Image (cartoon, rainbow, N blue to C red):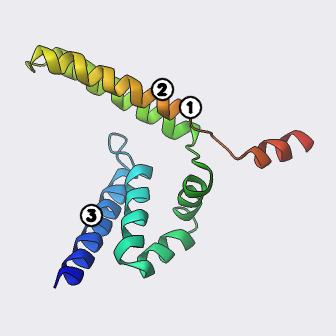
């Protein structure tokens, strides 16, 4: 019974995150890549066939593989994520949220942004290939 419920959990998470990622394609306020990465990861835990389909997809597969192999985050994704974090922090500061939250969440988002911008944007071999051509 536990094995079945685990599979249902991972499959539900995979489908939900895939759906959110697909919805995020036309909506600039909803990130696509993190949800697709979450979907592939959770599918790998309970739905290997979906994971393989995601990895083989011509548009969704390359970012998943780049993240898994090298921790790559494209520059466009960094800009979008940073803008959304800045907007979220600004809206929070302008809201009626508790003062402690108005200080802690922006600090946390700043740490996330620093981590994000420290991620590579392309593989070192790609950089070498770009310089030799």
The residue identified by callout 1 is 118
Q: Is residue 62 left or right of residue 20?
A: right
Residue 31 position (above or below residue 65): above
Residue 129 percent location from the top left of the image: 85, 47
The quarter of the picture where residue 40 lies is: bottom left
Q: Position of residue 97 (x, y in %)?
A: 10, 21
**Mark 2 burial class by Cα count in 10 Å: few <14, some 14-19, many 20+:** few
Secondary structure at badge 3 equals helix
Q: SS of the residue at dot 2?
A: helix
Q: Which residue is mark 3?
A: 16
Marks 1 and 2 in Cβ contact (< 8 Å):
yes
Name the residue at 29% across, 70% down.
Answer: 10
Which marked residue is nearer to the observer: mark 2 or mark 3?
2
Q: According to the image, label 2 marks what residue?
A: 114
Depicted 63 relative to depicted 91: above or below? below
Q: Residue furthest front?
A: 2
Residue situated in front as seen by the camera: 104 or 83: 104
Mark 2 to mark 3 CA distance (whole Å): 28 Å
The answer to which quarter of the image holds residue 119 is: top right
């Amino acid at each position: 019974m536990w094995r079945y419920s685990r599979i249902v959990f991972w499959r539900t998470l995979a489908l939900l995150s895939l759906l959110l990622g697909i919805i995020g394609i036309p909506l600039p306020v909803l990130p696509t890549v993190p949800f697709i990465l979450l979907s592939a990861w959770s599918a790998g835990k309970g739905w290997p066939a979906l994971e393989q389909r995601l990895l083989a997809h011509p548009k969704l597969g390359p970012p998943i593989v780049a993240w898994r192999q090298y921790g790559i985050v494209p520059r466009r994704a960094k800009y979008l994520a940073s803008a959304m974090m800045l907007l979220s922090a600004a809206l929070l500061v302008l809201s009626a949220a508790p003062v402690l939250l108005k200080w802690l969440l922006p600090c946390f988002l700043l740490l996330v942004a620093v981590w994000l911008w420290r991620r590579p944007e392309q593989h070192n071999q790609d950089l070498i290939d770009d310089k030799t051509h």
